[in-house]
């Protein structure tokens, strides 16, 4: 995965939502997605699949973090960093959009 600077891309006040483009299917607690636009498959682990599930409706990073901290054993600092990193990757790949751009 490419390293990207997500601090400029992801902020607390923007709500993000799934792009309607990728096709997703559950695989136990995990998720497999296929992007027709990119011709790529993506495998999401349990935490990433939980984030994807939350993004069915517009969510701010802070709201996502609150939900994940209730469901997983993670420190607030680690959760914040990982949510922003993952959202940055999803935004970069066009799989998630700022809610006002849908």
Image (cartoon, rainbow, N blue to C red):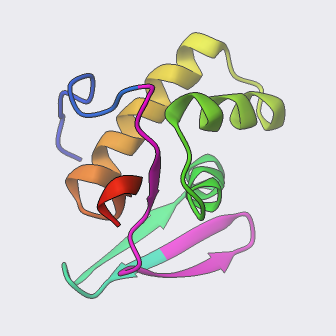
In the rendered view, tell whether residue 56 sits above or below residue 45.
Answer: below
Relative to 1, say whether 94 is above or below. below
Vertical side of 23 occupied by 14: above or below: above
Residue 77: percent from left, percent from top: 55, 11
Left or right: residue 51 compared with residue 75 = left
Q: Percent position (x, y) of residue 98?
A: 35, 51
| 80 up-or-down from 30: above or below | above
Residue 52 image position (x, y, % from top left)? 56, 58
Numbered circles on residues, count: 0
Residue at 40 percent across and 37 percent down: it is 14
Whether residue 98 can be seen here: no
Whether residue 8 appears in magenta in the rendering, the answer is no
Q: Going 24% across and 33% down the picture, which residue do you hit?
A: 9
Residue toward you, 87 or 56 = 56
Asked if one can make out residue 80 in the rendered structure from this viewpoint, the answer is: yes
In the shown orientation, is residue 57 left or right of residue 2?
right
Please identify the quarter of the rendering in which residue 3 is found.
top left
Which residue is at a point 55% across and 18% down the rendered structure image?
A: 78
The residue shown at (39%, 43%) is 87
The residue segment tinted magenta is 12-32
Q: Nearer the viewer, residue 96 or 48?
A: 96
**Residue farthest to the front, as pictured:** 100
If the image is split into quadrants, where does the C terminus sit? Answer: bottom left
Q: Position of residue 49 (x, y in %)?
A: 60, 58
Please say whether residue 22 is one of the residues in the magenta stretch: yes
């Amino acid at each position: 995965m490419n390293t990207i600077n997500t601090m400029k891309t992801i902020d607390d006040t923007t709500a993000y939502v799934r792009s309607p483009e990728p096709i997703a299917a559950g695989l136990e607690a995990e998720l497999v997605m296929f992007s027709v636009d990119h011709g790529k498959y993506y495998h999401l682990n349990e935490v990433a699949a939980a984030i994807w599930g939350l993004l069915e409706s517009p969510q701010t990073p802070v709201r996502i973090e609150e939900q994940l901290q209730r469901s997983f054993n993670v420190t607030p600092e680690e959760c914040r960093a990982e949510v922003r990193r993952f959202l940055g990757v999803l935004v970069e790949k066009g799989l998630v959009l700022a809610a006002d751009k849908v």
